[in-house]
Image: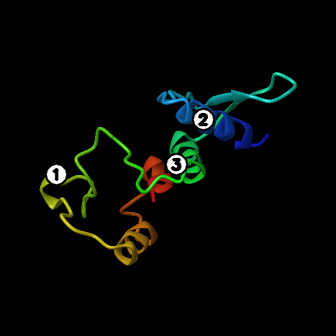
Amino acid sequence: MEIVSMVLAGKSIVNDDHIPVITSVASDEFGQQYNINADTLAGELATTLGGEKLILLTDVVGILEDRDNPSSLVKEVDIRRVKQMMEEGKIGGGMIPKY
């Protein structure tokens, strides 16, 4: 299964001045359903549409140095530090596709 056909449909929708609302559950030509990672799908769509930025909303406060300590919020971070924090296990789970 490819994300391509949905992305192309999204491009057509945007070209018609509409805002696409897309679910991350998709079916192939045989009716088999797949749960596609929504962050991955959003990135593919943004890239295909030539977006300058992709803004992802989440219900977490941000990147924490210590997951159990809300006061350990990282106020600024660069990509090297994000990679390091992933290696250290400080960033994981559903946050990884947002990288």
Split into 4 quadrants, where in the image is the C terminus? bottom left
Residue 56 quadrant: top left
Look at mark 2 in the image and give the residue it sits on: 10
Please tell me which of labels 1 and 2 falls first in the chain.
Answer: 2
Look at mark 3 in the image and give the residue it sits on: 46
Residue 91 quadrant: bottom left
Please tell me which of labels 3 and 2 falls first in the chain.
Answer: 2
Amino acid type of the residue tagged 2 in the rendering:
Gly
Q: Are marks 1 and 3 in contact (CB under 8 Å)?
A: no
Image coordinates of residue 19 in percent, x first then y, are: 47, 29
Amino acid type of the residue tagged 1 in the rendering:
Pro
Question: Which mark's residue is nearer the viewer, 1 or 2?
Answer: 2
Compared with residue 53, is residue 24 higher up or lower down, i.e. above or below?
A: above
Compared with residue 31, is residue 63 higher up or lower down, i.e. above or below?
A: below
Q: Are marks 3 and 2 in contact (CB under 8 Å)?
A: no
Compared with residue 31, is residue 6 higher up or lower down, i.e. above or below?
A: below
Amino acid type of the residue tagged 3 in the rendering:
Ala
Question: Which mark's residue is nearer the viewer, 1 or 3?
Answer: 3
Check disc 3 and report its element: helix, strand or loop. Answer: helix
Q: Residue at x 56, y 48 (%)?
A: 49
- Its colouring scheme is rainbow
Please tell me which of labels 1 and 3 falls first in the chain.
Answer: 3
Check disc 2 and report its element: helix, strand or loop. Answer: helix
Q: CA distance from mark 1 to mark 2?
A: 37 Å
Q: Tell how many labels.
A: 3
User: Which numbered circle lies on residue 20?
Assistant: none
Look at mark 1 in the image and give the residue it sits on: 70
Q: Residue at x 56, y 36 (%)?
A: 15
